[in-house]
Amino acid sequence: MMWHGTLCCFTLLMVPVEAVIHGATRHGTTKKQAGNIRFLSFIGTEGSGHHLLTPILRKVMNLTLVDTQDVGPARHISQASFLGGDDVFNAFMADDADALHTALKQHQPGELIQQAYSFPTKFHHRNADSRLFDLSSLYRMLASAGVDQMAVVRYERPAGDCARSVFKRWPSLCSDSLQACEEQQTVYGNLIEKHLDRLSKMQVPILRIGMDLLHRNCHKFGLQLLKFFREANMLLPDSPWRTEDEERTQNLTNTVCTVLQHREEMYLNHTSPSAEDGSSS
């Protein structure tokens, strides 16, 4: 696996990012701010790259978004929940706005809660009508509770590649039919885009990024993430990453490339993806 070892320019690239700095739209009665909690979603269909992209994103997040809080395991976990916010997840699934607001207030200011499961997610959650995949309701509830630091990272990969990846690893999820896998990709891909259109109108920042850019230019991939976290106001107030520093930025993008190389070596050495979550699928 070859990757760029030199960064020719340290100023953050003016790459297209579908993001708008915002104050979240409030719905209904105004409530007390829910502790300045940050909420970040990694959204993608099965096969879009969670097992490769999520470990790299979490490495960048551990460097840039948190102080003492650990953002969670490096590997992707398919469990349907909110990492760092099981109580918030339970309130959302119960459609209980008051319970969600109460749960958020139990968290410390600046805490980061993540939604990172795929659409659909493994064996237990495969109904497109499930509340589990209702991003619009989730973000409306968060906004109503006073959360105004919210953002979405959309994992992008051609639907055909996603379908083949799922079919290769878990054919039973598609009734042993590649065509069924392709149909699932269409259903959930359209579902994601419908919700992202609504979130965009709510001025929720959205970054579209995927494995193609990561493999073509791992440095640029790291720069896009850092630029997005800055513009989406996801950094802590006293974060040193709010200002540009060439050496620090170079170290961050080098780390992205190193993690990518490590994951690719694990995959080539036939390390079990279920155990290490290191495959590109």
Image (spheres, rainbow, N blue to C red):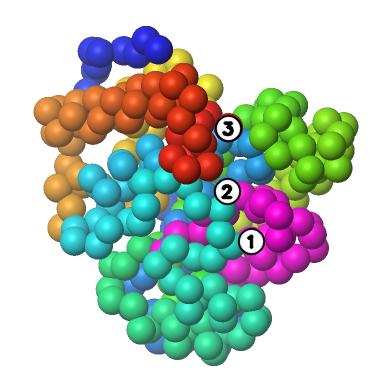
What residue is drawn where x is 66% and y is 43%?
45
Q: Kindly report the distance in space between the C-alpha atoms of the residues bearing marks 2 and 1.
A: 10 Å
Q: Which residue is mark 1?
A: 135
Identify residue type, mark 3.
Ser
Q: Kindly report the distance in space between the C-alpha atoms of the residues bearing marks 2 and 3.
A: 15 Å
The number of callouts visible is 3
Quadrant where the C terminus is found in the figure: top right
- Does 124 lie within the magenta span? yes
What residue is drawn where x is 39% and y is 21%?
265
Q: Is residue 72 above or below residue 258?
A: below
Q: Is residue 11 above or below residue 148?
A: above
Measured as percent of width and height from the top left, residue 208 is found at 54, 37
Q: Which residue is mark 2?
A: 43
Q: Residues within 10 Å of mark 1 (few under 14, many from 20)?
A: some
What residue is drawn where x is 67% and y is 51%?
122
Q: Which residue is mark 3?
A: 281
The boundaries of the magenta stretch are 113-141
What residue is drawn where x is 12% and y is 28%?
247
Q: Earlier in the sequence, mark 2 or mark 3?
A: 2
Q: Is residue 187 visible?
A: yes
CB contact under 8 Å: marks 2 and 1: yes
Identify residue type, mark 1.
Leu
Instruction: Please identify, in this view, whether the residue under mark 2 or under mark 1 is nearer the observer.
Output: 2
Q: Earlier in the sequence, mark 2 or mark 1?
A: 2
